[in-house]
Structures are given as C-alpha cells and as structure tokens.
Amino acid sequence: MASSNDKIALVTGAGSGIGRACALALLREGYSVVLAGRRLHALEETAAQAKTERALIVPTDLADAASIHALFEKTRDTFGRLDLLFNNAGSGAPPIPLEDLTLEQWRKVIDVNLTGVFLCTQEAFRIMKSQTPRGGRIINNGSISAHTPRPNAAPYTASKHAVTGLTKATALDGRKYDIACGQIDIGNAGTEMTACMKDGVQQASGAITVEPTMDVDNVALAVLYMASLPLDANVLFLTVMATKMPFVGRG
C-alpha cells in the first residue's frame, strides 16, 4: 500500500479544510497518507478526491486517548513506519465573553487542541525513534492565535499559545531520536471555517470588519516545503497568511 518513495504521513483533521488540502497535496507528492478525523463520511470524501489507494481512513476522536492509540497502532500495523505527522485537528469554543464560558467548553478545546496534540506526538515518538531509518518530522498547526487573540476566544488562544511551547519542547526532546518538529501558523486560509469573514468578523475595537482570505492551497504548499527538508534541517516556525489580514499593525 505504500508509495514508491515509501514515505508515510498522518494528518489529523483530514476530513475538511486545511487538513484535507494538505492530505491531498501529500498524496499527490507520492506519500501514503493516514486520514484521521471524527467524521467517517468526511474522510471518505477526502479519499475519493485523492483517487488513489495510498489513503488509509482511520476515524479517530482526538479527545480520546484510546482512540489516538488505536490510530497509531493501525498506522504501524499497515505501513510499518511513520515519516510525517501533521497535528492539524482543532476545536473552538462559542465566541462568548470569557466570564460566561463553562468549564466543559474550556476543557473540550484544551482536550483536542493541546492534549490531543501531545498524545499524537507521544505516539509518533514511539514509532519514529524505533524505526529504521530512525526519525521523522512532526508539524503542528499553530494559528495566528498562537501570537495574537481574537475577541472572545480565550480557550482557543490559550491552547494555541501552549502548542507553541509544545513545539519547542518536542523539537528539543526529539533531537536524540532524529525527530524534527516545527509549527505552521496560518492566517485566514479560505475554508468553511473562514466563510464568515466575507460578512465581517469582530475586531478588537468591537467593529465588524470584512477580512481578506487566501487560497488554502497556499497552506498545503508551505506544509510540503516543511516536509521536504532532510531531517538535519528544520523550519521551527513558519507563518503563512492572507497578506492584507489585520494581524500586523495597530487597530
């Protein structure tokens, strides 16, 4: 089932948006790709678009440790190794005032965006450090929210800031196993999640402003670049964003 170049990638959140675009790009590049996510039908749609037998569908709940363990066991059993993990799956809370968020809403975001990423990283380490050739690459989806929050987004912002710390720790702790780790921070990629930006979204000032977006394929190209490097080179942090989105500057 592996491709001619024997490179194996695993993409979480592969059923839509950024995850789907990156999974399809990796498949076109010759990788065999494990498609992970909660919704089976969405993963099947991604695989159908790929039009290749090199896509392996594994429905996974990124908030459940046993489900994550089963995902990586299935990957090891099918391919025997793992070269690239793209920790992409993420979740957000309703955009309500910080003081009105419930503990359950907070924990739901942290469980997927932080704990899920940690558990996937841990499982990847166990495979990558023991395979031959040894090592691999982990790419974490950070987000512009790893730098600057949007209004009423405390859980998501906190989780993405924490992912930055986890990326650094993973890059450090992976050195002895030839495991490289980097983070891609994405701003306003054109997906289902950013469709609302055409109607305007709330700014720090309270104003509702239309925000520019960019084609999601630009993210896929950036991920392919990060993945293409030899393991003795690493992109630690990369930001790819719509040029005119309100990130840099005052306002």
Image: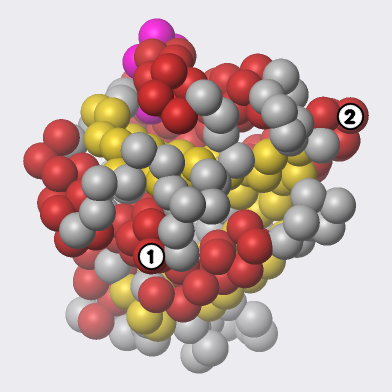
Q: In the rendered structure, which segment of residues is drawn in magenta?
A: 62-67
Q: Residues within 10 Å of mark 1 (few under 14, many from 20)?
A: some
Foreground of the two, 100 or 174 = 174
Decide: is 94 above or below 114.
below
**Is residue 63 a member of the stretch shown in magenta?**
yes
Residue at 22% across, 64% down: 192
Which residue corresponds to the image point at 45% horizontal and 29% vertical from the top-left?
A: 79
Judge whether 100 appears above or below 6 on screen.
above
The reply to whether residue 163 is visible in this rendering is yes
Q: Quadrant of residue 73?
A: top left
Q: Which residue is mark 2?
A: 176
Q: CA distance from mark 2 to mark 1?
A: 31 Å
Of all residues shown, which one is farthest toward the top?
66
The quarter of the displayed image where residue 193 is located: bottom left
Three-letter code, disc 2: Lys
- The x and y percentages for residue 93 are 34, 41
The image shows residue 141 at horizontal and vertical percentages of 54, 51
Q: Which residue is mark 1?
A: 28
Looking at the figure, which quarter contains the N terminus?
Answer: top left
- What residue sits 87% from the left and 35% below the top? 175
Q: State the residue lying farthest toward the bottom.
A: 244
**Between marks 2 and 1 in the image, the one whose residue lies nearer the viewer:** 1
Residue 5 or residue 107, whichever sits in front:
5
- Indicate the secondary structure of the residue bearing disc 1: helix
